[in-house]
Image (tube, rainbow, N blue to C red):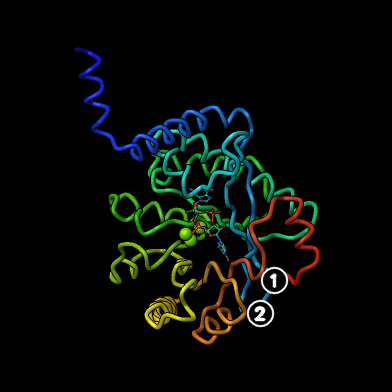
């Protein structure tokens, strides 16, 4: 009798759903263990100004699991958030990035801007800014240019909490970038009131830029909005010279993508920077 009941309930799930579910549980279990096993590391992707000089890097997390291989952060960050692992993982991301940027300053004698992605849950952690400030102090920077990349989805949360916090962040010298801009929910009026420094045009628009007039118009609109609000506008996912040329003709002033460099692990980044024109 029990067996039959079990069988029936199992049939509620399609095989693909079951696979997905198992995959998710396995990833979640592995994630919990992986922080101690040092399976995470950071990579840094250079960001260039309109003159082709590197002024900053975006920090991106990587997870190399012995069995799963390299798992995409687009896949494991949402799982880490839901499993409540993000506070620890977020701490690892910030601490590692700050430590390696300090080391880069000491080894190359240069100070780059570093942009760190902050997930919604991470931003909404009650003591996020206190922890961040403490972490920055720990490394005793003479100079640090830290940018936080947030997404439009943050503004689904309590704006009366978020807005003062953003102002506070600005006050202590952090800059704020709106990542994946154009894909989410954002009103022009709200954008006007936000203390941000940069709009980051989503890669999906850049991908289709050359053969899709709708994407072109979207990008032109984003750049116009950015210009009017006196923000930098960065295009991410730039892969070809033709894309760069068109983006420049539209007035885009910051660039990031495989055309210039892939996200690089610390040592590779250091070697790469030695060979490049820098804007510091
Ligand atoms: P994102 O912040 O929008 O990052 C841009 C993604 O585009 C990165 O993928 C980057 O490697 C990729 N990319 C950059 N240029 C090119 C290009 O020219 N061609 C192609 N095909 N791809 C390019 P990645 O590293 O896999 O990250 C995916 C997403 O995961 C990120 O999107 C971000 O939302 C999230 N993520 C990554 N690292 C972190 C992190 O440390 N913390 C948090 N909270 N989220 C992160
Ligand atoms: Mg980003
Ligand atoms: Mg992005
Ligand atoms: Mg993206």
> Image check: 191 left or right of 244?
left
Local crowd at mark 2 within 10 Å, few (<14), some, or many (≥20)? few
Q: Are marks 2 and 1 in contact (CB under 8 Å)?
A: yes
The image shows residue 102, relative to residue 50, as above or below, that is: above
Question: Residue extending furthest bottom?
Answer: 249
Q: Residue at x 55, y 77 (%)?
A: 253
Quick check: can you spot residue 107? Answer: yes
Q: Quadrant of residue 222?
A: bottom left
Where is mark 1, residue-wise?
279
Q: Quadrant of residue 139?
A: top right
Q: Position of residue 110 (x, y in %)?
A: 74, 60
**In front here: 14 or 265?**
14
Where is mark 2, residue-wise?
51
Q: Position of residue 92 (x, y in %)?
A: 57, 38
Q: Is mark 1 within 8 Å of ligand 1?
A: no
> Image check: 53 left or right of 175?
right
The image shows residue 44, relative to residue 200, as above or below, that is: above
Q: Secondary structure at mark 1?
A: loop
Q: Residue at x 42, y 80 (%)?
A: 212
Q: Position of residue 127 (x, y in %)?
A: 43, 38
- Real-space CA distance between mark 2 and mark 1, rounded to the nearest whole angstrom: 9 Å
Mark nearest the camera among 2 and 1 is 2
**Where does the N terminus fall, quadrant-wise?**
top left
The image shows residue 255, relative to residue 131, as above or below, that is: below
Quick check: can you spot residue 176? Answer: no
């Amino acid at each position: 009798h029990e067996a039959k009941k079990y069988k029936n309930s199992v049939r509620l799930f399609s095989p693909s759903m079951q696979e997905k579910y198992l995959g998710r549980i396995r990833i979640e279990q592995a994630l919990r263990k992986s922080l101690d096993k040092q399976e995470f590391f950071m990579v840094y992707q250079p960001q260039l100004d309109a003159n082709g000089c590197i002024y900053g890097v975006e920090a991106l997390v990587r997870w190399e699991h012995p069995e799963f291989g390299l798992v995409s952060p687009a896949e494991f960050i949402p799982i880490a958030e839901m499993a409540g692992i993000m506070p620890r993982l977020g701490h690892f991301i910030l601490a590692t990035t700050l430590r390696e940027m300090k080391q880069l300053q000491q080894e190359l004698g240069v100070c780059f801007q570093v942009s760190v992605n902050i997930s919604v849950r991470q931003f909404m952690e009650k003591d996020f800014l206190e922890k961040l400030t403490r972490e920055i102090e720990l490394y005793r920077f003479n100079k640090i240019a830290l940018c936080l990349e947030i997404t439009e989805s943050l503004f689904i949360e309590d704006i009366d909490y978020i807005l003062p916090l953003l102002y506070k962040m600005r006050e202590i010298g952090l800059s704020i970038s709106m990542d994946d801009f154009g894909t989410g929910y954002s009103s022009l009026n709200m954008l006007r009131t936000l203390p941000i420094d940069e709009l980051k045009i989503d890669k999906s628009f850049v991908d289709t830029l050359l053969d899709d007039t709708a994407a072109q118009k979207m990008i032109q609109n984003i750049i116009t909005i950015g210009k009017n609000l006196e923000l930098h506008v960065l295009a991410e996912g730039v892969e070809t010279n033709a894309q760069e040329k068109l983006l420049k003709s539209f007035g885009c002033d910051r660039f990031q993508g495989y055309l210039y460099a892939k996200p690089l692990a610390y040592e590779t980044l250091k070697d790469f920077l030695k060979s490049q024109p820098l804007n510091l």
